[in-house]
Every structure is written in C-alpha cells, then in structure tokens.
Image: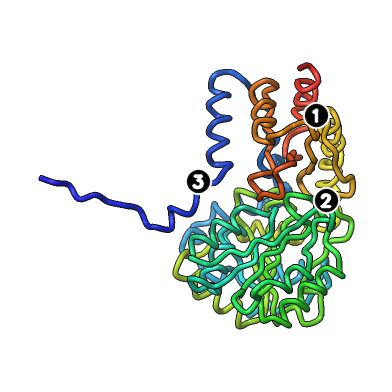
Amino acid sequence: MNTPKISPAERLDHIKEYYFSRKLQEVASLNAKGFDIVSLGIGGPDRPPHQEVINELCQAARRPDTHGYQLTKGLGELREAYAGFYKRFYNVDLNPDSEILPLIGSKEGITHISLAFLNPGDGVLVPNPGYPTYTSVSKIVGAEIFPYDLTPENNWKPDFDALERLPLERIKLMWVNYPHMPTGTPASHELYQKLVDFGLRHNIVIVHDNPYSFILNPEPQSILSIEGAKEIAIEMNSLSKSHNMPGWRMAMCASNPEFISWILKVKSNVDSGQFLPMMLGAVKALSLGQDWIDEVNEAYGRRRKIAEEIMTTLGCSYDPGQQGLFLWGRIPDEIDDVEKFTDRILYQNRVFITPGFIFGSNGNRYIRISLCATEDRLREALSRINAK
C-alpha cells in the first residue's frame, strides 16, 4: 500500500525557523554540557515587574470569577489605562473604545496587521537592518517585500529620495521602528513628520513599532503625536521592555477607528482574549509613574557601561548615542565573517552575542549585545573575552 506523501504549505519554502529559536537551542545544548554560556543575545528583560503588578496578578488569579474567556477587545479598564498612559507620556489623545486594541504581544500584532492590510502580491516596505519578523510575516501572507536601506551614512534613517524612486503604487504598508532595533537610533519629531507625509502622499500605511521608547531615552515619543498621523499610521507598543513583562504578552496598537476595526476582525478569529488577572496587572503597570522608568533605566545604564567595555575589548566601534535594550557595534575591518566571529566568541569565550546579519544584509559588519543580563554576568563575559 502506497502511503500518500504529505507536503507542508508552500509558504514554508520561503521562511526559516526564527534565528533565536535555533540558536538558543544550541546554547542550551552547550549549557547542558557544562559550558555555562553567558547569553547576551536576546532582548528579554531579566528583572521582574513592579511588585504591585505581581500582587495584582496574584490577587486576581485567586478569585473564582477571573478564569473565563475575555473579550477580544480586552478589558475596558485596560484600554482606558493605555489611553491614560499615552496622554501622560506622549501627550497623545486616544479614544479607548475605538482607537486602541490590546494585543497578545507585538510580534503577534505584526501578523494581525499584515493579515488585515496585505493581499498576496501587495508590496510592503521592510527596513534593512530591521526586526526579522517583519520579513517573515510578510512572506507568510504572500506580500512582495521591498527592503529599504538604513545605513550609517544616513544615520540609520530612511533615505526618502530613494523611497520615492520605488514603484510606490504597488506598495501598501511600511514597517518602521524608532528607537530603532537593532541600531539604537533615536526617534525624532522630524523623522515622524517625514514618515507621516510620505504615507499620506502615497497612500501607504505606516506601522510604527515602538517598544523601546522608554529605555535609556529621556524623551519618549510617539508617531501619533504628529498632526494627521492617525489617518495613515498605526503604532504598536508593549509592556515587555518598559515594564519587564515579556512573558505576559501585553501589548497594544493604536490608530483610527477604521484601521482598528479591520485588525479586530482578524484578531477575533485568531484568539479569545487575554487572561483577566494579567490584564488587571497590566492596568497596574500602566499606572506607574516616572519613578519606575527611572529605576529601570538606572539598571540598564550601569549594564550599558559594561557592554561598551565588551565592544571596545572586541575591537568594535559604536555610537554612544544609542537608545534601547542593546548596543550595536561595527566589527573590526580585518574580520571577514560576522557569524564566524560570534561563533568563535561563543565557543572560545563562552559568550553568546548576536551577529548583525540576521537583521538584514546591512547588518553584515555588525554585532549586537543585549543589556538583559545582570551586571555580574556582563562582567563575567568581559573577563572571559579579556582572558582569550
């Protein structure tokens, strides 16, 4: 009897397993053999949320009435908290009933937004270098990817003259992210103005991914603060980085009511809402003030100084004005392959550092160090690199 051959969907031919999914398995295997790898790779905050946030979660979870399905739109109290947060920190007015949609993480939001806006064959502008999920999700939905270059010569910002030369009539959506990951380039009011103007003139939806605006950044900004932005822009934000809640998967997107309603159509068919106690915990987190942000940044500031020493010891150069959870550095000219360079550091020095090529070809000469390790582990990484 011949067993019929089963093949995966053709979309899998165009994507790979996420780099960190693969590489962290390799690191775990080395740790199991006793190598004790210092991981400076992924950007997952290692410190806990505020104690009041944890208390709120625990208290709510003990109640018998908090374990059922929730509305896809999330708790009204949560949407109101997001709106209050945007007003306090960004001076942006949002209607919690129609202009905010909670997300089960920004990464999941990328998929919801792509499904809501992109037909197969539609063009999408993806930054190079940039977050790999923008590319992989665009491939999954069958969009045509138009990479746009970010280079040090242009301060890692879009070259709008180059963008104007693209077949913009075929392009429907543009992914942007400032403070930028992986380069740490700060946001600016002028850049946001140019992006909104570009989107309005060419009828291209600008999706701004904004999870790093509070990390080592004294002036958090939102693209939605620009006049006319809601007409064409969507902003995603997250509690993962700013409030040490990556595993909670608490994020949101904000835009005009029509855009939000389209994303809700997708989301309502994909998930059944978030766990109520976690939403109540997120409400508590969103009520925290500048003292919490300062506390978070004091820790990252100390770590950043050690990361800079690691970069210097490796012979890498970097821009000291970077913001966010990482330090991005250019490898020495005599190094011809960044992946071999980081693999040598992994196996000889027992330190895992991210090679920049995973963010696009413009990252081929760069590495990225995460600040999501304790000062002791960062010093241990520095000591190991110095020793060999």
Name the element at disc 3.
Answer: loop
Mark 1 or mark 2, earlier in chain? 1
Q: Identify the amino acid type marked 3.
A: Glu
CA distance separating discs 1 and 2 = 21 Å
Q: For residue 128, which quarter of the picture? A: bottom right
CA distance separating discs 3 and 2 = 28 Å
Give the image's coloring scheme: rainbow
Q: Identify the amino acid type marked 1.
A: Leu
Q: Which residue is mark 2?
A: 323
**Rendering coords of residue 31 (x, y %):** 58, 24
Q: Are marks 3 and 2 in contact (CB under 8 Å)?
A: no
Q: Is residue 388 visible?
A: yes
Q: From the viewer's perspective, is 99 left or right of 187?
A: left
Nearer to the camera, 250 or 40:
40
Which numbered dot is residue 214? none
Q: Is residue 292 visible?
A: no
Mark 3 or mark 1, earlier in chain? 3
- 34 up-or-down from 141: above or below: above
**Rendering coords of residue 275 (x, y %):** 53, 58
Q: Which residue is mark 3?
A: 17
Q: From the viewer's perspective, is 80 left or right of 137?
A: right
Residue shown at 83%/72% (left/top)?
91
